Every structure is written in C-alpha cells, then in structure tokens.
C-alpha cells in the first residue's frame, strides 16, 4: 500500500505526528485502568453491550474495550497497525456513544466519544503519515 500522503508538506506530517502522539498517549492512559481492572471491571464495562442486545460474555467485551483503548493508543503513538487500531477505536467509541445516548446523557457527557469516533474514522482515511514505525519495518 503506497503512502497517499507522501507528497504532503513536512508541516502536514509533523502535525499528524503530534496528533498521533497526543491521542495515542491519552488513549493509553484512558484504557490502562480498564485493561488492568481485571474480570470484575471488565464485566462492568462489558455489561453495557446489553444496550445493543449483546448479553453474553460481558468480561470479554469489557477486556476488548480496554485492549482497544490501550493497545490502539500504543499503535497510534507508534504508527503501526494503523487501520486495525483505528477500526477498533472507532468501534469502542461508537459503543460508548450508544451507551451515553441510551442513558439520556447530555452532550457534554457523550461529546468525547463522539469526537474521538469522528477522529478515528478520519484517521483511517488520512493515514499515519511519514513519521511512523511501520515505515521503518
């Protein structure tokens, strides 16, 4: 797969690197407590899947959310496994948005999930940029 952003200016690539690093670190910090929370925490988080009719294996879904946020954030930071990471993060943010909307939460509560979901969908199309680890591998 060719880098569609190869002809972009250095400012574009530096800006994308800053976005990747900042967002990656933020999602690693956000996902670490979920990932390290253990089965009880995973069941609590994964229990929200009932909102869309999925009632089996809540611990699996909760672990998956923490994994997507932490490991997906790490992938963003490093610029590796770009599309799978952005897809997992988009899915996690979509589920968080659905949960908040079904709870009747206000925009200020669900805006993070909405904004992050839009960001990850956009990053699928934008790409990881020139300064990424996968380019060196």
Image (cartoon, grey):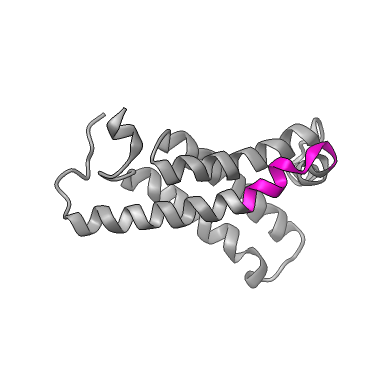
Residue situated furthest right in the rendering: 40
Q: Nearer the viewer, residue 42 or 26?
A: 26
Q: Quadrant of residue 66?
A: top right
Residue 103 versus residue 52 in the image, above or below: below
Task: Name the main secondary structure of what is drawn in magenta.
Answer: helix
Q: Position of residue 61 (x, y in %)?
A: 72, 36
Residue 71 versus residue 9 in the image, above or below: above
Q: Nearer the viewer, residue 5 or 67?
A: 67
- In this rendering, position of residue 25 left or right of residue 65: left
Q: Quadrant of residue 80?
A: top left
128 part of magenta stretch:
no
Residue at the image point whose x is 39% and y is 48% from the top = 123
Residue 127 versus residue 112 in the image, above or below: above
Q: Position of residue 65 (x, y in %)?
A: 66, 42
Q: In the rendered view of the protein, which quadrant contains the C terminus?
A: top left
Q: Position of residue 56 (x, y in %)?
A: 81, 31
Q: In the rendered view of the protein, which quadrant contains the N terminus?
A: top left
Residue at the image point whose x is 36% and y is 57% from the top = 18
Residue at the image point whose x is 80% and y is 30% from the top = 57
- In this rendering, position of residue 132 left or right of residue 95: left
Residue at the image point whose x is 48% and y is 55% from the top = 23
User: How many marks do you count on the picture?
Assistant: 0
Region in magenta = 30-40
Q: Position of residue 119 (x, y in %)?
A: 45, 55
């Amino acid at each position: 797969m060719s880098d569609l952003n190869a002809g972009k200016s250095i400012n574009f690539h530096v800006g994308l690197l800053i976005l990747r690093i900042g967002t990656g670190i933020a999602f690693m910090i956000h996902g670490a407590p979920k990932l390290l929370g253990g089965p009880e925490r995973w069941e609590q988080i994964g229990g929200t899947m009932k909102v869309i009719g999925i009632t089996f294996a809540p611990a699996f879904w909760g672990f998956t959310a923490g994994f997507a946020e932490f490991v997906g954030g790490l992938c963003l930071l490093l610029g590796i496994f770009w599309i799978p990471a952005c897809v997992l993060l988009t899915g996690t943010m979509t589920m968080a948005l659905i949960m908040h909307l079904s709870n009747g939460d206000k925009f200020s509560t669900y805006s993070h999930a909405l904004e992050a979901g839009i960001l990850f969908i956009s990053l699928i199309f934008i790409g990881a940029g020139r300064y990424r680890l996968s380019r060196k591998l």
